[in-house]
Image (cartoon, rainbow, N blue to C red):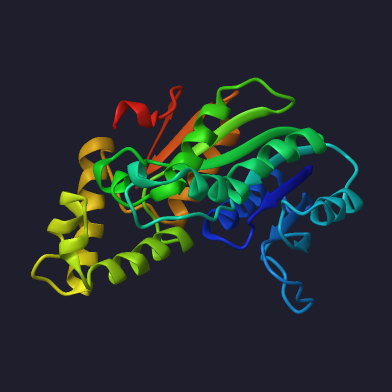
Amino acid sequence: MGNFLVIGGSGVMGQAAIKAVRKKFGNNSNIIANWYGKVDTNISIEGATKTIFGDISDPNCVNQILAENQDPFDYMFYATALGEVGVPISQAHKESIDQSNRLSFDPILMLEETLNIKIIVTYSTFYVIRHQLATYGAMGFSKEAIEKWTLEPGKSHHTCIRAGLFESQSSRGIKLLLRKSAKNPDKIKDPLLKSYFLGKSSKEGIKEFEEGIFAEEKEAYGDCRTNSEDLYQSHLTLFETKNPLFVNVCGKRIWLSKEPQLLKDYF
C-alpha cells in the first residue's frame, strides 16, 4: 500500500520505478504517473493507477495531481528531462542550461514545496567520464544541479539513482546529433569525439563511440551495458537502504555513495 508519484512514467526509468513499487509495496499501491504530452484518453501509463498528461511545470498539471490525491506521497520519482545534448558540457551556454533546467531540474523544487512528499527520488548519470563530458551538453549542468540538491536539507528526504548508459530518449538524441556532426568531422572541436568520425561513416563512428562509453564505464565502475532490469534492481536497493544519498548502477553492479560529481573538478 501507499501513495506514489512518478513524473515521466512512460520512459525506461519511470517504468523501472513503477515495476519496483509494485514489487515492493504491492499491487494495491496508488501510483499517479505523469506523461509529458497531449491528452489521449486511449493511452495510459503501464502499471499506473492514474495517468495525468501535461507539462509538470504547468500549474494546471500540478492541480490535477492534487485533485487525485490529497494524502502525503511516500515517494516521488522524477524521471523526466529535456535539454541540449550532443555538444561538450564545457561549451553549454547559460541560455541552454536555463532551458534544460526548466523541465530537468526546476520543477523538482516546486513539487517539493507544493506537495507533501516523504522521499524524492531523482536521476543522474556518470556525466564526468570523458565520453559524456564530450556530448552531454547543458544536461550535464542539470544533472550536476540535481546531485548538489541531493545533499541539501528540505521538506522531503532527497535521494538519487545514478545510472550508466542505457537506451533512452536522451541517448537517442545524442546519437541523432552526432550523426549530423559526423557529416563535417573537421568542425568537431572535441578531439576525442572527432577521432571517432574521421575517415568513417556516421554509423561506424556512432557505434564505436557508444562502445567507447561502455569501455570507459567498465574501466571506471566495474561493469557496463545497463538495461531496464538493472534499473529496476537499483530501485529495490534504494527501498532496502535507510536514507540513501546516491544509489549507483552500472550494468549489474549496484553500490552506494555519498558524494556528488562536480564539474569544476573536470574542466
Q: Nearer the viewer, residue 31 or 20?
A: 31
Can you name the residue that lies furthest to the left here? 199
- The x and y percentages for residue 235 are 55, 42
Task: Please state if 242 lies on the left or on the right of 182 as rendered.
Answer: right
Q: Residue at x 29, y 32 (%)?
A: 267
Q: Residue at x 64, y 41 (%)?
A: 106
Task: Please state if 65 lies on the left or on the right of 177 as rendered.
Answer: right
**In this orientation, does residue 24 appear?**
no
- The x and y percentages for residue 135 are 32, 52
Quarter of image, res 179:
bottom left
- The x and y percentages for residue 17 are 60, 50
- The x and y percentages for residue 79 are 59, 50
Task: Please state if 54 lies on the left or on the right of 176 as rendered.
Answer: right
Quarter of image, res 50:
bottom right
**In this orientation, does residue 259 appear?**
yes
Query: What count of labels does the image hold?
Result: 0
Task: Please state if 139 lies on the left or on the right of 64 as rendered.
Answer: left
Q: Residue at x 49, y 30 (%)?
A: 246
Q: Nearer the viewer, residue 187 or 178?
A: 187
Screen quadrant of the N terminus? top right
Quarter of image, res 47:
bottom right
Q: Nearer the viewer, residue 23 or 255?
A: 255
Q: Residue at x 66, y 36 (%)?
A: 120
